[in-house]
Image (cartoon, rainbow, N blue to C red):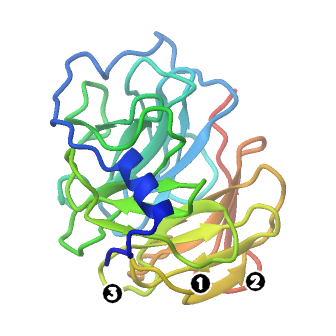
Amino acid sequence: MHTACSPTACSSLARFAFAASLLIAPGCGGGGPASGAPQKGVSPVAGDWNGDGTDTLGVYDPASGFFFLRNTNTSGQADLTFSFGAGSLAFLPIAGDWDGDGDDSLGVYDPTNGYFFLKNTNTPGDADLVFRFGGAGAGGIPVVGDWDGDGDDSVGIYDPSSGFFFLKNSNAAGNADLVFTPSTGGAGDEIGGDWDGDGDDTLGLYDPTNGNVFLRNSNSSGSPDVTFALSPSRTGFLPIEGDWDGDGDDTLGLYDPLTGGVFLKNTNANGAADVTFLFDPIP
């Protein structure tokens, strides 16, 4: 559902809902350095890389353009390592089932120009989809989910300055299909998942200052449907979301990029992590 177009919402919509044509850009992937050794400063990603029904961890090194993916939520080396693009410290990693084939693959978003680069396989090579959605340099943060329950994932943008979400039901340039702001009581890190197991993904926010999580079960304005505190909450920890136990709904976790510590919850409720392990592919 779209919200009423208040002055704040309209100014954000003008920045993020662009009519730009879909491009297939050659040479936007498959580069990267000859060595797969990543540098510190990685970002976590999560997805069902092998189509087994459970989501597992990965990390992205923006300096080199390399992804490192695990097929189990246990300590160990990456099961898949590949480069996608030449790498840029500005790039933000995303993951989703772009083609509805039952497994997730990677992508990156370039906030400097508003372009998405999506891969349908977790292998080196050029992007399968390239399009613009979002304002160049406007500070938008990418979100991913199956917003309409059609079996494939599409992108969106979160504007932290206004609190508005702008969601697309197709991975193509054009205006947002959904525009709204949830009432969470403050700003935070955006998160998206199927919190109630109904087959479509909705949004939420994680407050890194205190570990509080605010989840909505519909993509519309309103108060949180679920609120709880995620632990351990420490400075620098990053939120991750996925179906860790294969039960059909998504839950939260935290990743420590300094140590590779992973803390996963199987329920969206207060309490200690259900699964804890290390995944740090940095030498």
Q: How far apart are marks 1 and 3 (CA)?
A: 15 Å
Q: Visible in this render: residue 183?
A: yes
Mark 3 Cα-neighbour bin, 10 Å: few <14, some 14–19, many ≥20: few
Amino acid at dot 1 = Thr
Location of residue 43 in the rendering, given as x and y in whole percent from the top left corner: 60, 41
Residue located 45% across and 69% down the image:
6
- Picture quarter containing residue 28? top left
Residue located 66% across and 75% down the image:
213
Secondary element type, mark 3: loop
In the rendered image, which residue does mark 1 sit on?
Answer: 267
Q: Do the residues labelled 2 and 3 touch (CB within 8 Å)?
A: no
Amino acid at dot 3 = Asp
In the rendered image, which residue does mark 3 sit on?
Answer: 198
Location of residue 37 in the rendering, given as x and y in whole percent from the top left corner: 58, 21
Is 160 placed above or below 212 here? above
Quarter of the picture containing the C terminus is top right
Label 2 vs label 3, nearer the camera: 3
Q: Are marks 1 and 2 in contact (CB under 8 Å)?
A: yes
